[in-house]
């Protein structure tokens, strides 16, 4: 047993989709969330910059004595996870590997066609494509960057007409391609799930990576014997590097927690 909290970070509110799944799967765990809102967006920054920012985020969480870190950000996972694993000894996982392993384990199709949508930086890194091709036989991957979606999600524009048009445009490469699954490779994108569903129909499996990460984490904590006590009721605290943003409104809606504001603290991790 290990009563220390789990650290989770992202550039903004997107990682809260991962936090929501972790809370659901692991109600006994305390969570510390870091939203690097001052440096949002990560999606169009260089690999070098992402490594620098992710190193600071992980360093801050480690200073809070967390027992493990989840990179709840596709961009930081694709560009900085390997580097962070070299720097820090603490268990660190991102969103790619748990998702790919889950697809591998549960595949039923002979040939499988997978769409991936993510930020510019993630798509350029080729990480999803590489890992899917390495781990899964007979897979075809169709990738598309959707650079407008994360900024729109931060604004809370996830169901208005602008969001509808953006999703319609971004889903075009997947229409009539008969994809089996689409991976929401940026953690902001589950906020558009309903619109994506409307465009792609019910046949396509829409993968929320947060759910896969939470599943993985649940098994990992148990196998490592570092889960919190069963009678403990998990608490979450939230740190933001800037509070001049819509994080609170969007996150309150997502978690349906009106007390969220009182649990948020502004910090400097420079
Ligand atoms: N939520 C992030 C991701 O999964 C970052 C989006 C951004 O900051 O551009 O990629």
Image (cartoon, rainbow, N blue to C red):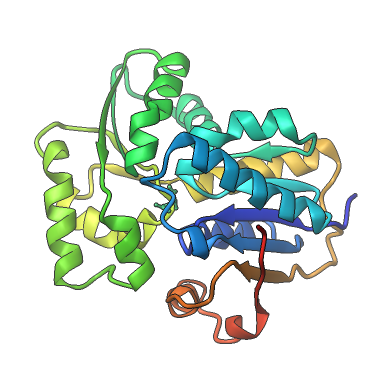
The image shows residue 189 at horizontal and vertical percentages of: 36, 54
Q: Does any portion of residue 126 appear in the rendered image? A: yes
Q: Nearer the viewer, residue 194 or 230?
A: 194
The image shows residue 127 at horizontal and vertical percentages of: 43, 27
Q: Nearer the viewer, residue 10 or 41?
A: 41
Of all residues, the one furthest to the front in this rendering is: 270
Query: Eyeballing the image, is 52 above or below 237?
Result: above
Q: Residue at x 77, y 43 (%)?
A: 221
Q: Residue at x 76, y 63 (%)?
A: 30
The image shows residue 57 at horizontal and vertical percentages of: 64, 52
* Quadrant of the drawing holding the C terminus: bottom right
- On screen, residue 171 versus residue 185, left or right, reads left
Q: Quadrant of residue 20?
A: bottom right
Q: Does any portion of residue 118 appear in the rendered image? A: no
Q: Nearer the viewer, residue 97 or 207?
A: 97
Q: Residue at x 47, y 64 (%)?
A: 13
How many numbered circles does the render carry?
A: 0
Query: Eyeballing the image, is 254 above or below 66?
Result: below
Of all residues, the one furthest to the right in this rendering is: 1
- On screen, residue 141 versus residue 91, left or right, reads left
The image shows residue 164 at horizontal and vertical percentages of: 16, 63
Q: Residue at x 64, y 54 (%)?
A: 8
């Amino acid at each position: 047993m290990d009563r220390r909290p789990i650290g989770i970070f992202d550039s903004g509110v997107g990682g809260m989709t991962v936090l929501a799944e972790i809370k659901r799967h692991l109600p006994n765990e305390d969570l510390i969330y870091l939203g690097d809102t001052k440096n949002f967006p990560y999606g169009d920054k260089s690999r070098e910059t992402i490594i620098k920012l992710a190193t600071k985020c992980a360093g801050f969480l480690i200073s809070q004595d967390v027992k493990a870190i989840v990179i709840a950000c596709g961009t930081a996972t694709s560009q900085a996870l390997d580097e962070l694993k070299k720097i820090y000894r603490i268990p660190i996982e991102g969103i790619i590997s748990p998702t790919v392993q889950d697809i591998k384990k549960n595949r039923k199709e002979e040939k499988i066609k997978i769409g991936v949508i993510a930020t510019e930086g993630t798509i350029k890194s080729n990480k999803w494509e590489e890992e899917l091709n390495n781990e899964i036989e007979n897979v075809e991957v169709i990738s598309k960057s959707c650079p407008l979606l994360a900024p729109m999600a931060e604004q809370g524009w996830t169901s208005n007409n602008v969001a509808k048009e953006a999703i319609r445009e971004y889903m075009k490469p997947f229409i009539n391609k008969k994809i089996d699954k689409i991976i929401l490779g940026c953690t902001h994108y589950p906020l558009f799930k309903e619109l994506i569903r409307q465009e792609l129909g019910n046949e396509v499996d829409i993968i929320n990576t947060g759910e896969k990460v939470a599943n993985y984490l649940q098994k990992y904590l148990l196998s490592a014997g570092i889960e919190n006590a069963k009678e403990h009721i998990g608490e979450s605290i939230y740190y933001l590097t800037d509070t001049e943003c819509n994080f609170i409104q969007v996150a309150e809606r997502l978690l349906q927690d009106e007390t969220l504001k009182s649990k948020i603290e502004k910090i400097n991790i420079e």
